[in-house]
Amino acid sequence: MKKIIAPGICLRAYEADDADVFAAVVRESVETVGRWMGWCHADFNSDHAREWFAACDKAREEGTAYEFGIFSEDGKVLLGGAGLNMISKLHNYCNLGYWIRQSEQDKGIATRATMLLADAGFKQLDFNRIEIVAAEGNINSIAVAKKVGAQLECLARNRLIVGGVPVTAAVHSLLREDWQASLTYDVQK
């Protein structure tokens, strides 16, 4: 999958021309996103973005992750990022992660992107289980997990590293047999 288009939103693979904008969006978001994700820092630049894009392309080719930029429906305005990653082929599940640029937070974008990715994960990639793992205290990410119907399974000690320190994280799950969403979107491979 390289692109998912739905009313009001486009999830697509990053392109080389996105590097400068991606870097600017990351720097804009240090205060909120950077608190939880170490890659989001004030020195993030276009070279870092291109390295990330190359890693995303390689992972997509290998089937080990499907990372997307979250864009406006026309694919032009970068709103954040989301992906299906940490794929276990043996156990047929993955992680679903997301982040939204600071100026676009609290508009339902993460929820819409998460719904689309979960639906595609179940219907296009045939996963049995999708996990959403958010650091304890990351109330915005935990709220998104709840809004999409993910069930809190546990608080896992030392599950994530935040600021170089192991922290407890809330582990939520979505299961294919429970998935009820009826979404309209177009997937391009």
Image (tube, helix red, strand yellow):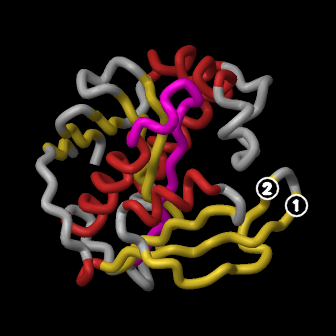
Mark carried by residue 140:
none
- Which residue is at the front of the view, 175 or 65? 175
Q: Position of residue 18 (x, y in %)?
A: 47, 20
- Check disc 1 and give the amino acid type: Val
How dense is the environment of label 2, judged by Cα within 10 Å: few (below 14), some, or many (20 and up)? some
Mark carried by residue 165:
1
| Image side of residue 58 versus residue 13, left or right | right
Chain part drawn in magenta: 93-108
Q: Position of residue 5 (x, y in %)?
A: 21, 38
Q: Position of residue 104 (x, y in %)?
A: 49, 29
Q: How many numbered marks appear?
A: 2
Picture quadrant where residue 148 is located: bottom left
Where is 118 relative to 103, above or below?
A: below
Secondary structure at numbered mark 1: strand
**Residue located 39% across and 19% down the image:** 77
Q: Circle 2 is placed at which residue position?
A: 162
How dense is the environment of label 1, judged by Cα within 10 Å: few (below 14), some, or many (20 and up)? few
| Image side of residue 67 versus residue 103, left or right | left
State the residue lying farthest toward the right: 165
Picture quadrant where residue 173 is located: bottom left
On-image quarter of the C terminus? top left
**Residue located 51% across and 66% down the image:** 132
Q: Position of residue 182 (x, y in %)?
A: 13, 61
**Residue located 15% across and 46% down the image:** 185
Q: CA distance from mark 1 to mark 2?
A: 5 Å
| Image side of residue 185 versus residue 143, left or right | left
- Check disc 2 and give the amino acid type: Val
**Residue located 78% across and 25% down the image:** 42
Secondary structure at numbered mark 2: strand
Contact between marks 1 and 2 (CB within 8 A): the answer is yes
| Image side of residue 115 versus residue 63, left or right | left
Where is 14 relative to 176, above or below?
A: above
